[in-house]
Amino acid sequence: MLSENGVRGGGRVGLNTGVTAFRLPTKLAEFAAGGQEPRLTEWAATLPSVVPAVVARWELNVDEAYEPGGQCSWVAPATTAAGDAVVLKVGFRHAEAEHEAAGLRFWDGDGAVRVHADDTFDDTSALLLERAEPGTPLARAMPPLEQDVVLAGLLRRLWRRPPEGHPFRSLASMCEFWARDFDQRAGSAPPAFDRGLLREGVTLYRELPLGSDDDVLLCTDLHPENIVAAQREPWLVIDPKPYVGDRTYDATQHMFNMDRLMADPGALSDRMAGLLDLDPERLRLWLFARCAQEAPEWHDLYDVAVKLAP
């Protein structure tokens, strides 16, 4: 998904002046043109009118959108009427990111960017966020082993129990959704894939979130492209997709975003378990389950699942 960082370019929107040469950032334009998500394609076509309306409502001066951006959002640096540097994120409403603003408000700047304002309407979510400067992604700023340490330190700070009555959905509900999706996709896996092994992994994918007795608020999509350099703190998390559940799950997304997963998944899993003070066996089970669930479409993960199979 989209990170609020990158090279500028993608249309300038001035305060109450409408749009000048408005265009979509590269990744959003490509995804919308691909037609994989018809509702998003229709939504993207409304942005030349939606973005100026949000800009006027919040009295912003907005610069060009970040490039290449992400698949589901139009994101740009902006300045408020009071002169504060912020980021405007106008996104397509989708289930995973439904509680992004609520999660950021819960963390209240402790390891993550602050949210100043938010709104939802029709298929649009709009957020006015703290601008992290210089905004360099962790993925481009440090060697991989050092990235592990920074990411682990942030996760350990973010893992806290939300209060009673919180709006966040359970990790179990998310896993059940993707397990049902696997059931529909399993037949598309290559014939050589062991169906028994895949079913074992997806069974674990359903069961593991039910066995946690210390549920906390999770990012679920934290990796080094979603951690950016800042001045208020050295590093801040952006673009969370909050759910409540087993903290062990939260270590898996980072591992999915590195080559080391293919080379030696067991050693990588044990390293992250140590950095995060997690049960190494439980983390291996989670990683195996996720690889099995993803394998019908991401074929390289089948080999990882075989290496991790209990």
Image (tube, rainbow, N blue to C red):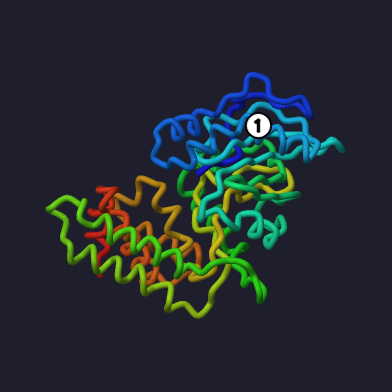
Instruction: Name the quarter where the C terminus is drawn.
Output: bottom left
Residue at which label 1 appears: 49
Q: Quadrant of residue 219?
A: bottom right
| Residue found at x 29% / y 48% | 298
| In this picture, residue 223 sits left or right of residue 122 | left
| In this picture, residue 64 sits left or right of residue 266 | right
* Label 1: which secondary element: helix
Instruction: List x then y, in percent, for residue 270.
Output: 38, 63
Say how many tags the image has: 1
Instruction: List x then y, in percent, for residue 164.
Output: 66, 76
Query: Is 85 in front, or is 134?
Result: 85
196 in relation to 143, above or below: below
Instruction: List x then y, in percent, for residue 47.
Output: 60, 33
Q: Quadrant of residue 90?
A: top right
127 in relation to 154, above or below: above
Task: Give, as a three-letter code, the residue at label 1.
Answer: Ser
| In this picture, residue 191 sits left or right of residue 98 | left
| Residue found at x 34% / y 58% | 181
| Residue found at x 56% / y 40% | 73
Query: Is 45 in front, or is 106?
Result: 45
Instruction: List x then y, in percent, for residue 304.
Output: 27, 55
Q: Is residue 135 visible?
A: yes
Q: Is residue 9 visible?
A: no
Q: Residues within 10 Å of mark 1 (few under 14, many from 20)?
A: few
Query: Is 257 in front, or is 181?
Result: 181
